[in-house]
Image: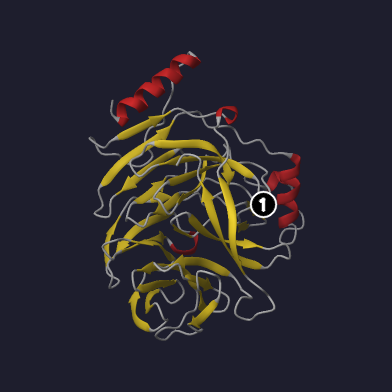
Amino acid sequence: MNLRSIVAVLTLFTASACFEPLEFADWSLPVPDGTPVFDYAPVAAEEREGSIELVEDLVIGDKSDPNTSFYQIRSVAVDDEENIYVVEHGNHRIQVFGADGTFLRSFGRQGQGPGEFETPMSIVAMGRRLAVADISNAKISVFSLDGTHQADFPLPPSSGLLAATPAGSILGFTEAGGLLSQSWIPILFSADGQELRRFAELPLDRTPVMEFGGRRFYGSRVPRDRPGMAASSSGILYVSPRDQYQVLSYAEAGDLRWALRVAGAREPFDVSPELADEVVAAHREFFAEVTAANINWPEYKPIITGLAVDGHGHLFVSRYGYGLEAGDESPVDVYDADGARLFAGFMVRPTWTAARGDFVYGIQNDPEGEQVVVRSRLVEPFD
C-alpha cells in the first residue's frame, strides 16, 4: 500500500468513526491537476501523541562582553563546520562564533558602500560563502566565511533570505506593495543575485488594529492570519496561505511537488476580557480614548502561526494557541519531505532561524531581557 492509500484509509476511518464526513476547504492557492494531494484528518488535543523536546545545548550572550552584548538580533546562520553567524541589526554587523560559542571575528559596519549595512535582516550560508540581505540598501551582500566582502547584488525592497540550495541558488522572499504590502512572494535568486523565478503570491491581512480619529494603527497584538514560508537545505520551499490549514511544497525548479490540507471548520474568535484589556492598554499611549469597541477584532481564530524546517528536512507546522506565555507548548504537526504526517503533538512554538543535524538555532531573551542566541538539541519522538 502506497503513502497516498494509507492517508486515504486513515482519513476514511476517522470520518467513519466520527459518523460525519470530513470537509476540506477549497485551495486558497492554485493546485494544478495531477499534483499529489494529501487530505488529513484533524487531531484533537486529547489525541495528540506527546511533546517534542528542545534541550538547551549552548547559549551565546553576555552583556559584559562587547562581542556578545547583542543589539537587535535578526537572524542566525550555521556553516558546514558549525560556526555560527549572528546578524546584529542594531550594530550593523555580523558576529561569528565557533561551534563551542567562542567569539571568532566580526565584520560589517554601518553605511551604504561595499560590505556595509544599514538594515541587515537575514543571512544564509552557501558552502564557502555567506549571503546577507540588507533591506534598506536593497542589496544582497556576499562574503567569504572569513568576512571578506566579495560582491553586492540588487535586492527587491522589503526582502529576506530563507535558505541556500545545493545548486548554489538562494531562496528568499519579497513583499509586494511596500510598507503596507498586500502579499509575500517567495523568489529564487542565482548565486550572482539574479532573480530566477517567483513562486506563489501569499496574501497578507492588512486590516488595521484600529481606526480612530481619522488615523489607522497597525500592530501585532491582535492575532491575524499570516502566511507561512520555510525552506530546507535541500532546496525545497514550503508555503502556506493565511486563511486555511494548507501547505504547498515547491521544488527549486518551480514545480509544485505536492499539496496537503487538514479538514475542519474554523473556530470563531472570542475576545476575552484579559485580551481586550491588554490590547487597549497597549494603544492608550497613541489614542487616549480608545476602548475595546474601537479594535478591529478578527472573526475567526488563526489556524497556522508558522512553518519551520529542522536539520533533517522535517517540516513543522505550528498551530495557533491563544494566551500562551514564553515557553508554553502549543500544537504542532510534523511532516516529512514527501508530505507524510509523522507526528501530531505539542512543543514550544518553533522559532529557530537555522538548523543543522540534530540542532536548531534561535533567538531568545534571557531572564534580564537581553537577547541571546540559543542552540538546542531537537529530540524528536518520531525518529
For residue 106, above or below residue 290: below
Secondary structure category for the residue under label 1: loop
The quadrant where residue 25 appears:
top left
Mark 1: amino acid: Ala
Q: Please state if 41 lies on the left or on the right of 366 as rendered.
A: left
Specify the quadrant that holds the C terminus.
top left
Residue 156 seen in the current view: no
| Image quadrant in which you'd find residue 272 | top right
Reading the image, the residue beneath label 1 is: 326
Q: Residue at x 26, y 37 (%)?
A: 35
Q: Is residue 247 above or below residue 234?
A: above
Q: How is the image coloured?
A: secondary structure
Res 151 visible? yes
Residue drawn at (53%, 54%) of the image: 377
In terms of image quadrants, where is residue 164?
Answer: bottom left
Q: Which quadrant of the figure contains the N terminus?
A: top left
